[in-house]
Image (cartoon, rainbow, N blue to C red):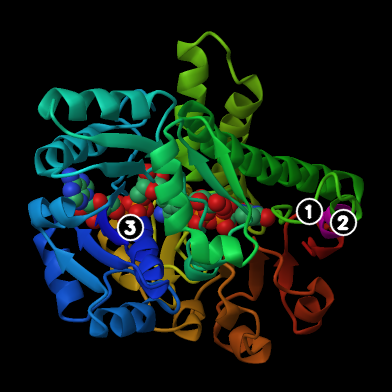
Amino acid sequence: MRIAMIGAGYVGLVSGACFSDFGHHVTCVDTDQSKIDALNRGEIPIHEPGLDTLVASNAKQKRLNFVTDITRAVGEAEVVFIAVGTPSRRGDGHADLTYVYAAAREIAKAITKFTVVVNKSTVPVGTGDEVERIIREENPEAEFAVVSNPEFLREGAAIRDFKHPDRIVIGSSDARAKQVMAEVYRPLHLNTSPILYTDRRTAELTKYAANSFLATKVAFINEIADLAEKVGANVQEVARGIGLDNRIGAKFLHAGPGYGGSCFPKDTLALIKTGQDFEAPLRIVETVVAVNDQRKRAMARKVAHAFGGNLRGKTIAILGVTFKPNTDDMRDAPSIPLITALQDMGAEIRVYDPVGMEQARKVFENVTFCDSAYDCARGSHAVTIVTEWEQFRALDLKEMAAIMACPVIVDLRNIYAPDEVVRNGFLYSGVGRPQSVAY
Ligand code: NAD
Ligand code: UDX
C-alpha cells in the first residue's frame, strides 16, 4: 500500500515509520524544509525512544521517504493521512484548524485517482465534513473518501503504543474506504488489536472524550492527594485501592504537579468549546481544566512552605522540565507555570533535564541551566523533582545533602520513599503522603 503522511511531527513521523515497518511504502511530507533536510540526513528532530533506528532501517529499505513537495506523494498514494498540528486557537481555546484545512487544499489539487484521505490529527466534530467540502470545492472531479482515524499514542512510548494499540478507531460510512483502512491496519489487526468501525463524527468525538476522561482521572487523583495530606492518608495506596477495581482501572492515577503536554490541555479546552457551541456544556471537563490550572501555583506554594512561605534569597533546583519523561517536548509542561510562580515568589531557579535542555533554553528566562542533577542541586536550598526521569530515582542522597545549601527535597512525582530521604538528613515533601511532610 502507498501512503502519504502529511506532517512529519510527533504523530506523522512515528505513524509513518511504523506503517513503513509494516511493509507499506510511506512518503512523509512536511512544509518545514529544515525538518525534511534533517530527516534526509538521518537526524530525528524529536526525542522518542527507538524512533532513530526504526526510521533508519525503513529509510534504508526505501520504504520511507521525506519530501516537501506534496504533489507527487499524494498523486501516487492510495491513502493520505493528515497529521498536522491542531493547537489551541489564540484567545478562545477552539482547535486551530488552519493547518488541517491548508493540507486539505493541497491534497485536493494533487489527487489523481480514488484516494482515501484520513484525518489523524485530533479535530473537532464536523472537521471531516469540512475537509470533504474543501476537497470537493478545490477539485470537483476528485474521487475520494474522508475518514477519521484518531491517534492514541503517548509520547515517550509512541512506537509501542502505535504497534500495540488498545484499539484502532475508524470513522467512515464509505465501504471502499473501510476496506482500504482494514488493509492499512491489517498487521495490527492480526496482532489482535481490535478495530472499531464507526461513523466519522463519532470517531472525532471519541478522541476528545478519551483524552478528557484521562485528564479527569489525573485531576481527580490530584484532588484526592490534597485531601489525603490534610486527613493523614496515603494517595498512592488509595490509588491502588481504587485502581484494582476493574471498573476504575489502575492507570492514570498517579498524583503529581498536574497534567501537561501537547494534547490534554488543548484537547480539554477544545472539547469544552464544542460543548458550549452545541449547548451541551461539559461542566466536569470545565472543572478539570480549572483544577489543573490552579495546581501549578499550588505546587509552587508547596515549595515555598518549606521556607515559611518566603522564597526571597532562596535558590530552587528544578529536576525535569519536559512534561513527562522520555520526551524533549515542553509543550504546556507543568514546569513552565511552576517556575514562573517560583520566580514571582522571589526564588532563583536552576534547571536540569536529561534531554530537554535545548527546548528549555527556548522557553525559560533568568534561570541557570545546569549540566547534571548534581550540578543543579549545588548551592540550592531545595531540589524540586518535576518530571520523573529514571535517572532521578537513584540520586546519591548523601552527596546531594553535602552540596546543597539546605537539604530539602520536594518530590512532586512521589519517586522517593519519604523515610529513606529523611534518614539521609533531608526535609522531604511529596504529594498526598502526609507522613512525608517533614517540616
Ligand atoms: P507537531 O507540531 O509535532 O507536527 C505537525 C507537523 O505538521 C509539523 O512538522 C508541521 O511543520 C507540519 N505541517 C503543518 N502544516 C503542514 C502542511 N500543510 N503540509 C505538510 N506539513 C505540515 O504535531 P503533533 O504533536 O504530531 O500533532 C499532530 C496532531 O496529532 C495534532 O492534531 C495532535 O493533537 C494529534 N496527536 C498528537 C499526539 C502527540 O502525542 N503529540 C498524540 C495523538 C494525537
Ligand atoms: C496523551 C494521551 O495519553 C494519548 O492517548 C494521546 O494520544 C496524546 O495525549 P501524552 O500527552 O503523550 O499522551 O502523555 P500522557 O502519558 O497521557 O501524560 C499526559 C500528562 O498527564 C503528563 O503531564 C503526565 O505527567 C500526566 N499524568 C499522566 C499524571 O500526572 N498522572 C498520571 O497518572 C498519568
Callout 1 amino acid? Gly
Task: Tell me, yes or no, whether the highlighted magenta stretch contains residue 190.
Answer: no
Q: Is residue 256 visible?
A: no
Within 8 Å of ligand 1, the CB of disc 3?
yes
Observer-nearest residue: 161 or 302? Answer: 161
In the rendered structure, which disc, 2 or 3, sits on the residue that comes first in sequence?
3
Task: Pinpoint residue 189: horizontal percent, then vertical percent.
Answer: 58, 60
- 10 Å neighbourhood of mark 3: few (<14), some, or many (≥20)? many
Residue at point 42% right, 33% down? 174
Residue 234 numbered tag: 2
Callout 3 amino acid? Gly
Taking 275 as reference, is 93 left or right? left
Q: Report how far apart the C-alphas of labels 1 and 3 lie in the structure.
A: 38 Å
From this view, report whether residue 393 is shown above or below residue 343: below
Observer-nearest residue: 228 or 21? Answer: 21
Magenta-highlighted residues? 233-239
Task: Pinpoint residue 231: horizontal percent, then vertical percent.
Answer: 90, 45
Q: Report how far apart the C-alphas of labels 2 and 3 lie in the structure.
A: 41 Å
Q: Which residue is mark 1?
A: 432
Please identify, in this view, whether the residue under mark 1 or under mark 3 is nearer the observer: 3
Q: Which residue is mark 3?
A: 12
